Amino acid sequence: MSHRQVLQALSGLLLGMFVSMLASTVVSTSLPVIIHDLNGDQVAFTWVVTATLLTTAISTPVWGKLADLFNRKLLFQLAIVIFVLATAAAGFSQDTTTLIAFRAVQGIGAGGLAALSQVLMADIISPRERGRYMGLFGAVMAVATVGGPLLGGLITDTLGWRWNFYVALPFAIAALVIIQRTLHVSVLVKRTVRIDYLGIVLLSTAVSLLLVWISLAGSSFDWWSTETVLMVGGAIIATILFVVAEMRVAEPLIPLTLFRNLTFTLAVIASIATGIAMFGASVFLSQFMQLARGATPTEAGLMTIPMIAGLLLASIGVGALITRFGRWKPFLITGGVLLIAGSFLLSTIHYDTDFAVVSLYMFLLGAGVGMTMQNLVLIVQNTTNPTQIGVASSGVTFFRSLGGTIGVSVMGAALAARVTELVADRKDDIGAAIAGLGDQASVWAAQLQSGTIPKVSAMPETLRVVFEDIYAQGISHAFLIAVPFAILSLIAIVFLPNKPLLRMTTSERIQASEADFATVSVPEGMDALSATGTVTVNADDERVDASPEARADRR
């Protein structure tokens, strides 16, 4: 494909990804306001995010497997429809339970968009050439990630937060039309299709039990309790049964043979930390800006631009360098170091930390994500059997989403526990601040006792300073959890086999492998080859004519 043809094919794919990211990021800055208006607490806040991440993680390998069996273009369009309709339905929520339910359905579509975009890209662009086009994905990511929160904050402050859920609809319609007209991929060879339904159920059970336990333990029940034994035990049993099932079914959801590939195994480990950094930062930095610095949703969107700038510059710059020089490992190692630095430094911030310093920390974390996120999928696609590109790509994306989901759950649980502890420790300061509010004392006392996440920016000065300090300490404590995972990610990256990037697309590799098979398996194919010389067949160095005519005479 020419450069122009590639750009035309990518246009619909890029717009589909933009729809997915815009619908997610436009809500991010308004989540504290949404949860406050729906009378939700910190657990509800965490689950509004976690529900989407959970179903995204679970559905990603399912979409990846379907991509190896069905029309990938049609699946991508279906994912867009599911995602946008669920997003729009979430705008009608009247309580946090309904919102969480629609966000869970939204995650099913998001899983398809995340998995299929990588697979479709591999269909039309070779690993070696993909870097020059990664800048386009980086630009789309930056526009959606920067513009989404800004637009969401502006809509929340003017029209109301419900309109954030409807803004992606016109973009989704445009994406469907453009994809239909511009994206043309090769049709897969038809074969008998067997869906691993048992694997889907067991994987969903294992992941769901684990996340429910992480979210509720320590608040709804003790860490060491009967509920913990049942949930953790159930998750372990479901995981064991899932592994056994995957070894027996004809079309496994996640083929365990993939883990024989060292590149795939290490990339999965490295992706977990990337997911935690990416999802954790997007969720809790927004909370930090609004709850620890008193920013409005619009201001919070502006204040996270340094992280997006780091992600954009790293993604575009590193992609271009990889295409030019064909070397990827030094950039991945640098990205792993930046993940550690960014996560650790963000764990040291306070409510009065100079914003220039916080911006630097966010930039480092964003650059680390930009250098590792897409390139881990790239090197896996580079070494995987072309007939398993779908499950391999979605496998890395799945574990990145799973890592992000578990990370957000753990960080949210740690934040909630830390805030509860700090509120108890500063009970006297809070009481003194409320006592000095006069007629408003009873109003703020009732709001704080309700358990709903407070709107810190609307608090009186004396009370606001106390809660800004409390939430800043809680959020910085949550970021500390990401540090050991980032270290593990760097170790995995260091041991990745440094294999050169291929110059063939997935479709070309499949065609080449089919041609090779036909050549060596069909006699007519062998006869079509011209002689290349003589072959030694015995110790006396007797030479045998290898021409097609001679082979026919010997037959």
Image (cartoon, rainbow, N blue to C red):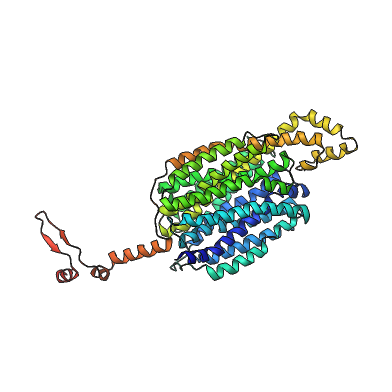
Q: Is residue 163 left or right of residue 115?
A: right
Q: Residue 488, percent across and down? A: 50, 38
Using the image, determine if residue 347 lies above or below residue 377: above
Q: Is residue 422 left or right of residue 236?
A: right
Using the image, determine if residue 223 lies above or below residue 109: above
Q: Residue 274, percent across and down? A: 54, 45
Task: Give the quadrant of residue 553.
Answer: bottom left
Q: Is residue 161 left or right of residue 146?
A: right
The foreground one among 312 and 365 is: 312
For the view shown, which residue lies furthest in the left direction? 540
Q: Is residue 294 visible?
A: yes
Q: Is residue 213 visible?
A: no
Using the image, determine if residue 209 lies above or below residue 466: below
Using the image, determine if residue 462 lies above or below residue 91: above
| Residue at image coords 60%, 52% | 142
**Quadrant location, the C terminus:** bottom left
The foreground one among 428 and 433 is: 433
The foreground one among 17 and 407 is: 17
Q: Is residue 1 left or right of residue 361?
A: left
| Residue at image coords 58%, 68% | 178
Q: Residue 433, percent across and down? A: 83, 32
